[in-house]
């Protein structure tokens, strides 16, 4: 017996908390992947990353409205179309922002941080003016509702499973693009030695732009996935931005594996502790631990010892 | 000739005290040994030049001595102080000065201010707050400035100095601290022939007070200043001795000329 | 180099004179007490902005957590005022008289031990500075000794601001939660809500502001100030010239924290409450923009930046609330991309040369020379 629970019940609760943590983990990973590309590869701090995510969420919401009104027959698969559109929207906005702002600031990371914060304020107010301050939620297609019963206590919602599956697919895709494709090699070449990469014929400006766009596009997909587990509002993105930055920094900025591992650690720690104490205290403890560890090991968990 | 002078000063070579004793020094970056089991002995008042192909580990050796990189193994003794466990500023206080490969000066400050910040007083937080520009400071700065040929540029912003002048300024910033061991990473890179000659003269002038380790590629300059030359290759010492000796060492010829 | 007379160069004496006239003559004589109190509130942010000039402009350390120190200073002051307002007589309707009302509402029955020191004003005044500085010292020690800087430092300070906000809101029995500590009344029996008190507090605030300005200027013109520029430019060169760079960064960060804390305490006194909405991520980054708008290298600029942005915020959010965020966002982008040295930069680069040209004949060549000096921008 633990507290008022039997051991069986207790493990089930732990498992359910663990699963709740896994969904949080998925959102963290999807958001952090985009950030890890932009921050880890380009050294750019994008404070408006959350707003790119919310753009994806709004696109998904409007798709769901559109399909249920005009194409109810295709409603069961609208989500995949919405996701593609969300990617395109965020990708496009990302390209625009890189062209109009980021490219002038590559040598001034702190200034990028401030400028993108300004961008995030503008986007938030834009969403509020255009879409309203009210939070909106999507209608899920029939097949995503319901839950799988593993035991009579443990229930796993299907939309959660779907988000997790999606996370795995996108992570693998990002890995392949960044580390197994010729284009990924170009990106890494530019980041390691811009002048040399330019000298061997890589269009470094184009690489910058596409990389930034890609990071933003992934945020759009994250937003799309986010609609399935939470509602969307103009300021929802800001709630996650600091957590996500901590995830990326904690994992060691340039390491994909590190990002995933740290997203896992942080989300699991938080959701497990939430069971034992209030949500806010769980968050305080998690963040404090992360900040504490970062003070002891500022380079993050997974980094190489590099010759200077 | 230089060897003879040194021999006269220290009669018994076995009892000789080196100013710098580096032994079995190794540093590895993720398995790659940039410096591998290296031993190096520098005499008092010696100008030692380290040469070697790119990537031989020359700069890393200086990084290790001045504490910028931590050694994986081995010892670095400066007189009787073990440098491997000391922090960078403590190593400077012990009397080791280091010039970087690219002239590293404060571009937004004037030559005077650059030298003033290197003046060895008021190095603590409150010392810096209480620091006053008194006659001693001014005199020392003028003395050093004329030594490094910058007497007329004291109020010039460092950013607009020529490349050679920047190199001199950085050397001056070291000299004002009167270090006993001076380490210069490519001090004449980017200098004109005239400037190179002046730099060689400068180094030969200051040698009465300190020992110098120089990394340099310019062989003419090396011949002008070196008492002894150490040739490094792939993190190890390939050859050591007078310029004449290493020039004719078949191993050195092999590394530089052929494969 | 610009010629200096005492702590200021000639043109800075003029700036000081103008500032003094504005703060102590123009505002008090032209504004009613309500507006003057508003100006006083804006000026409390000027303390933070001046701290940021030192640590961000000069030291290159961008802290996105200055709200933490502003908040800690403010809370320390507010806790004292709250205890004074919570006498057993004034709170006799509570189930536990003599403790702050919000504690009673949250079923707290005894004053927590860490509230006890705030019964004493001298102790409070010490703690107003000591608590934030201690925090800054610990953060600085941990980060700068390990050479954490730049964006990492910015993000971690931002996370700390987030943590403190969540903590304050979560522990509402001890902190007043999201409403903060409200209903502050008297300081040693002196009612701080009256017009007279507000008038006096405005002058106290202004005096402290000038004092901080002088301290900041003292640091700026000392060798310490030149070292900060050197560290920002070539940190390794400074380190290998025999300085323990981390100590300098810790000091300047603590200094910025102390300035912020004074601002926070004066805020609590003048506005009459303190709440977590001045601690978190958003207020902290807004404080950076006050500094950036004024000019990150100018102590005077920081004061004007804080005044102007806050005045604009009040006007805008009264009349066009939707436009304010657009304006604020635009301000962030503009100040970074077009005016990196803020108002001080604009003044120096575009306006001053014209003024000097106008009076060129009168002033002679000496002053014009000073303007063309690259250092005058600071």
Image (spheres, coloured by chain):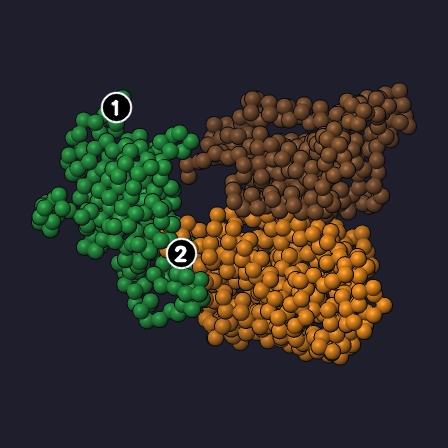
Chain colours: A brown, B green, C orange
| Residue C243 marker | 2
Which chain does tag 1 point to? B
Q: Residue at x 66, y 50 (%)?
A: C163
What's the CA distance linking mark 1 and mark 2? 45 Å
For the C terminus of chain A, the image quarter is top left
Residue found farthest to the front: A1
Q: Quadrant of residue B94?
A: bottom left
Q: Is residue C255 above or below residue B31?
A: below
Secondary structure beneath dot 2 equals loop
Q: Nearer the viewer, mark 1 or mark 2?
A: 2
Q: Position of residue A223 (x, y in %)?
A: 74, 34
Q: Which mark is residue B258?
A: 1
- Residue B205 position, x and y percent, is 20, 54
Label 2: chain?
C
Q: Does mark 2 fall on the same chain as mark 1?
A: no
Tell me if residue C211 can be seen.
yes
Tag 1's secondary structure?
A: loop
Query: In which quadrant will I find the N terminus of chain A?
Result: top right
Locate residue C109, reporting x and y percent.
Answer: 77, 61
Q: What residue do we see at 64% from left, 69% from top?
A: C124
Q: Residue at x 48, y 47 (%)?
A: C146
């Amino acid at each position: 017996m633990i507290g008022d629970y039997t051991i069986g019940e207790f493990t089930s609760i732990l498992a359910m908390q663990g699963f709740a943590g896994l969904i949080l983990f998925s959102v963290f990973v999807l958001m952090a992947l985009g950030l890890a590309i932009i921050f880890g590869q380009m050294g750019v701090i994008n404070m408006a990353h959350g707003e790119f995510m919310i753009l994806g969420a709004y696109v998904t919401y409007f798709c769901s409205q559109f399909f249920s009104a005009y194409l109810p027959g295709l409603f069961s698969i609208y989500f995949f179309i919405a996701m593609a559109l969300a990617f395109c929207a965020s990708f496009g906005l990302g390209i625009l922002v890189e062209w109009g702002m980021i490219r002038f600031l590559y040598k001034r990371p702190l200034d990028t941080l401030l400028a993108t914060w300004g961008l995030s304020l503008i986007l938030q107010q834009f969403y509020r003016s255009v879409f309203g301050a009210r939070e909106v939620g999507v209608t899920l297609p029939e097949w995503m509702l319901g839950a799988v019963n593993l035991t009579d206590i443990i229930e796993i919602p299907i939309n959660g499973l779907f988000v997790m599956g999606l996370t795995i697919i996108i992570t693998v895709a990002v890995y392949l693009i960044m580390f197994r494709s010729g284009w990924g090699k170009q990106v890494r070449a530019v980041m390691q030695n811009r002048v040399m990469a330019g000298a061997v014929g890589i269009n470094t400006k184009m690489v910058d732009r596409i990389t930034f766009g890609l990071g933003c596009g992934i945020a759009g997909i994250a937003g799309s996935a986010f609609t399935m587990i939470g509602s969307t509002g103009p300021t929802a993105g800001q709630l996650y931005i600091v957590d996500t930055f901590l995830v990326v920094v904690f994992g060691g900025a340039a390491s994909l594996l590190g990002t995933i591992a740290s997203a896992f650690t942080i989300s699991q720690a938080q959701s497990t502790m939430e069971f034992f104490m209030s949500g806010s205290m769980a968050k305080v403890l998690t963040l404090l631990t992360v900040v504490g560890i970062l003070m002891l090991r500022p380079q993050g968990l997974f980094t190489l010892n590099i010759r200077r | 000739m230089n060897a003879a002078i040194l021999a006269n000063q220290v009669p018994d070579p076995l009892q000789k005290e080196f100013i710098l004793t580096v032994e079995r020094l190794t540093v590895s970056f993720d398995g790659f040994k940039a410096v591998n089991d290296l031993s190096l002995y520098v005499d008092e008042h010696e100008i030692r030049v380290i040469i070697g192909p790119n990537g031989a580990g020359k700069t890393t050796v200086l990084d290790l001595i001045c504490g910028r990189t931590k050694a994986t193994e081995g010892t670095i003794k400066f007189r009787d102080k073990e440098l491997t466990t000391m922090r960078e500023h403590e190593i400077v206080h012990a009397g080791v000065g280091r010039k970087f490969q690219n002239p590293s000066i404060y571009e937004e400050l004037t030559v005077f201010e650059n030298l003033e910040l290197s003046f060895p007083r008021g190095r603590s937080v409150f010392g810096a707050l209480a620091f006053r520009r008194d006659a001693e400071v001014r005199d020392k700065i003028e003395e050093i400035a004329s030594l490094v040929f910058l007497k007329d540029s004291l109020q010039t912003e460092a950013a607009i100095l020529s490349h050679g002048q920047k190199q001199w300024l950085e050397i001056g910033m070291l000299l004002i601290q009167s270090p006993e061991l001076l380490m210069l990473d490519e001090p004449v890179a980017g200098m004109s022939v005239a400037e190179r000659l002046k730099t060689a003269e400068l180094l030969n002038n200051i040698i009465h007070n300190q020992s110098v380790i120089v990394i340099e590629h310019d062989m003419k300059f090396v011949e002008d200043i070196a008492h002894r030359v150490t040739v490094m290759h792939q993190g190890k010492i390939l050859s050591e001795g007078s310029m004449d000796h290493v020039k004719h060492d078949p191993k050195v010829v092999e590394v530089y000329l052929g494969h | 180099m610009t010629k200096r007379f005492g702590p200021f160069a000639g043109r800075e004496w003029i700036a000081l004179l103008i500032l003094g006239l504005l703060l102590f003559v123009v505002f008090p004589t032209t504004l009613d007490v309500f507006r003057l109190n508003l100006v006083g509130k804006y000026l409390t942010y000027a303390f933070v902005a001046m701290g940021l000039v030192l640590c961000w402009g000069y030291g290159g350390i961008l802290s996105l957590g200055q709200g933490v120190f502003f908040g800690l200073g403010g809370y320390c002051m507010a806790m004292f005022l709250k205890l004074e307002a919570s006498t057993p007589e004034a709170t006799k309707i509570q189930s536990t008289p003599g403790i702050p009302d919000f504690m009673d509402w949250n079923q707290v029955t005894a004053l927590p031990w860490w509230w006890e020191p705030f019964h004493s004003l001298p102790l409070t005044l010490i703690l107003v500075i000591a608590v934030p500085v201690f925090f800054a010292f610990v953060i600085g020690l941990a980060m700068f000794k390990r050479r954490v800087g730049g964006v990492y430092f910015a993000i971690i300070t931002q996370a700390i601001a987030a943590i403190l906000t969540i903590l304050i809101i979560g522990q509402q029995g001890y902190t007043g939660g999201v409403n903060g500590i409200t209903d502050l009344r008297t300081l040693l029996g002196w009612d701080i809500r009256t017009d007279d008190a507000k008038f006096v507090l405005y002058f106290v605030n202004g005096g402290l502001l000038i004092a901080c300005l002088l301290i900041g200027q003292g640091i700026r013109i000392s060798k310490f100030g030149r070292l900060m520029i050197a560290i920002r430019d070539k940190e390794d060169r400074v380190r290998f010239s025999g300085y323990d760079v981390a100590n300098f960064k810790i000091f300047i960060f603590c200094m910025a924290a102390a300035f912020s804390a004074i601002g926070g305490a004066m805020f609590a006194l003048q506005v009459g409450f303190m709440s977590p909405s001045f601690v978190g991520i958003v207020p902290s980054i807004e404080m950076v923009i006050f500094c950036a708008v004024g000019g990150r290298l100018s102590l005077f600029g920081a004061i004007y930046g804080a005044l102007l942005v806050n005045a604009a915020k009040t006007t805008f959010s009264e009349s066009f609330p939707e436009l304010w965020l657009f304006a604020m966002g635009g301000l962030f982008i503009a100040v970074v991309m077009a005016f990196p040295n803020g108002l001080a930069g604009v003044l120096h680069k575009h306006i001053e040369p014209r003024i000097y040209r106008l009076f060129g004949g009168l002033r002679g060549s000496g002053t014009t020379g000073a303007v063309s000096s690259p250092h005058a921008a600071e």
